[in-house]
Image (tube, helix red, strand yellow):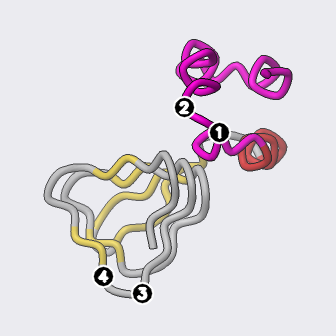
C-alpha cells in the first residue's frame, strides 16, 4: 500500500505487503522491505528511514489536513499553500 503524496525514486523495488505512509520519499535505487512511516525519507538496500521530513507536531497537522482528499477546485485554489507547505494557510482554507 502506498499513501498519498509519496515520491518514489527511479529503479526502486517495493516488496509485497509493505506500507508506505503519506508524504514519504523513497530514494532512487532503494529496496523497500519494511513499512515506511508517513513523511519519512527512506533510502538504501534494504531501505531504512534516514530522516523525517517534519517534526511530530507538523506531521500530525499535515495528516489532519489531508489535502489530497479535497475536491479538485479546493486543491486548485490552494496550490500555492500546498507547494509552499504553508500549514496555517491550509488549515484555514475554504
| Residue matched to label 4 | 15
| Spatial CA span between label 2 and label 3 | 30 Å
| Residue matched to label 1 | 70
- State if disc 3 and disc 1 touch (CB < 8 Å): no
Q: Residue at x 54, y 48 (%)?
A: 23
* Dot 4 or dot 2, earlier in sequence: 4
Going by the image, does 10 lie left or right of 24?
left
| Residue matched to label 3 | 17
Q: Which mark is residue 41?
A: none
Kind of element beneath mark 3: loop
Kind of element beneath mark 4: loop
Task: Give residue 1's position: percent from left, percent from top.
Answer: 45, 73
- State if disc 1 and disc 2 touch (CB < 8 Å): yes
| Spatial CA span between label 4 and label 3 | 6 Å
- State if disc 2 and disc 4 touch (CB < 8 Å): no
| Residue matched to label 2 | 72
Q: Quadrant of the C terminus?
A: top right
Region rendered in magenta = 65-94
Q: Residues within 10 Å of mark 1 (few under 14, many from 20)?
A: few
Question: In this view of the protein, which residue sits in the foreground, 54 or 15?
Answer: 15
* Dot 1 or dot 3, earlier in sequence: 3
Amino acid at each position: 500500500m502506498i499513501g498519498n503524496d509519496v515520491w518514489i525514486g527511479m529503479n526502486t523495488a517495493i516488496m509485497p505487503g509493505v506500507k508506505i505512509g503519506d508524504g514519504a520519499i523513497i530514494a532512487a535505487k532503494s529496496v523497500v522491505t519494511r513499512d515506511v512511516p508517513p513523511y519519512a525519507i527512506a533510502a538504501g538496500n534494504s531501505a531504512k528511514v534516514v530522516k523525517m521530513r517534519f517534526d511530530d507536531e507538523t506531521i500530525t497537522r499535515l495528516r489532519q489536513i489531508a489535502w489530497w482528499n479535497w475536491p479538485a477546485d479546493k486543491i486548485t485554489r490552494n496550490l500555492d499553500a500546498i507547494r509552499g507547505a504553508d500549514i496555517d494557510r491550509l488549515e484555514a482554507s475554504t
